[in-house]
Image: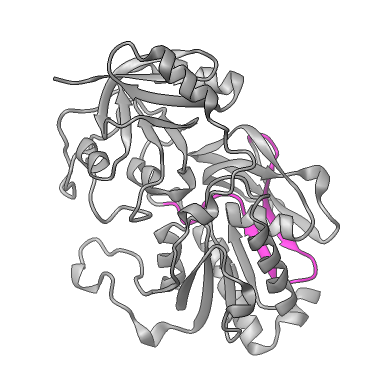
Amino acid sequence: MTEKATLALENGAIFQGYSFGCADTAIGEVIFNTSITGYQEIVTDPSYALQIITLTHPQIGNVGANHIDVEADVLHASALVVKSLPKQVSNWRSEYSLDEFLKARNVSGIYGIDTRKLTRLLRTEGALNGCLMCGDDVHETAIEHARKFAGLKGMDLARVVSTKERYDWKAGSYRMFDEESNNVECPDRKSFKVIAYDFGIKQNILRMLTDRGCSVTVVPAQTNFATLDKDVDGYFLSNGPGDPEPCVYAIEAIREMFQSGIPVFGICLGHQLLGLSAGARTQKMKYGHHGANHPVRDLLTGEIMITSQNHGFAVDDESLPDDLIVTHRSLFDGTIQGLQHAKYPAFSFQGHPEASPGPHDCGAQFFDRFVELMQQHKDGRLRHAQAN
């Protein structure tokens, strides 16, 4: 028998449905994601730590889940909210149902609620704190839990989800029909040494760097820059959850990266931290950007890209120092999507060019640019290139 479940919001709204996945109580910030595909990427992305994810597509779980299409080995999302959970799974790559996948990873879920109504509420009032509980007569308790949650503003979650030990990443992109070559290092192609700061890094970022000839060492979020090997070609700043402003350890490290003259590339939280390191501020957004259909304009070329997004904070336009150049803007609300430092070989993007399953409009652009900067640095051409 399916157990009843309740999603309660801090404003007193109640949504009654049924439990799937783990049946534990889940508390967090309730947000919505408009992606039609990629639910496994979404729920395994560490950037969703302490968030209850509402998926707006009406059917979720129909292609099941597997051990390959994950972005992290440990799940940090609080819970998953869907309208309809198919009883049958139909995909030749599926290894488990979504219910089994979440249950094994201790993530709670609720289905059978009106996700359109919930999404409209969140769009009107903004992201709200919520609590998911199983059982009967839990409404008041769930509302109380939701109201006691402190919210993500001021919360440093990067150090919570980050790796505890540094490690070397060796796998390139997954090859669908070439199982023997997957997760195998190609040492002859490693041309660049990259240190990636893990603030909640997605594995596809590491795969895309490896595809481009990078030998990647992943280090914990709180790694002191002075302890790092300086014989490197580039520094990467990863995506991650929470408020960027409390991550003082990262801001200080990035400032030292600037001074080193070595290329720096940041994505999502890494983009925000790069902005903070250059003197900008960040702000909490009303309901953030979460989806795979977000148009972004490249201000340097005029090109419009459809991008994947997942963030609840943004670099504040009014705080930008002269050293930061805005390179990309959202066509939804005009918020900053890309930055470039005027003095140092450092740039960043708010969206997710590594998104899997996509869209793939901007993946090559940003990763190839990072590689080109590293090649210029190796060749001694970087200062001249920056001057131009």
Region of the chain picked out in magenta, as a range: 332-355
Q: Is residue 377 above or below residue 105?
A: below
Using residue 254 as the reference point, say whether residue 99 is left or right of it: left
Q: Position of residue 318 (x, y in %)?
A: 82, 43
Where residue 42 sits in the image (x, y, percent)? 40, 43
**Is 281 positioned to the left or the right of 52 in the image?**
right
Quarter location, residue 313? top right
The single residue placed furthest to the right in the displayed view is: 322
The foreground one among 119 and 188 is 119
Q: What residue occupies the far top of the structure in this picture?
A: 137
Picture residue at 41% right of the left edge, 60% below the top: 204
Quadrant placement of the N terminus: top left
Q: Quadrant of the C terminus?
A: bottom right
Q: Is residue 43 above or below residue 270?
A: above
Residue at screen point 34% across, 71% down? 171
Q: Looking at the image, which is closer to me, 107 or 371? A: 107
Q: Position of residue 270 (x, y in %)?
A: 60, 57
Residue 343 sits inside the magenta stretch = yes
Q: Is residue 44 visible?
A: yes
Question: Picture quarter containing residue 368?
Answer: bottom right
Picture residue at 65% right of the left edge, 82% below the top? 376
Residue 388 visible in image: no
Is 112 contained in the magenta span?
A: no
Q: Tell me: 127 left or right of 117.
A: right
Q: How many marks?
A: 0
Residue 110 at x, y percent in the picture: 32, 25
Q: Looking at the image, which residue is at 66% across and 37% down?
A: 284
Front-lying residue, 139 or 371: 139
Q: Is residue 132 above or below residue 220?
A: above
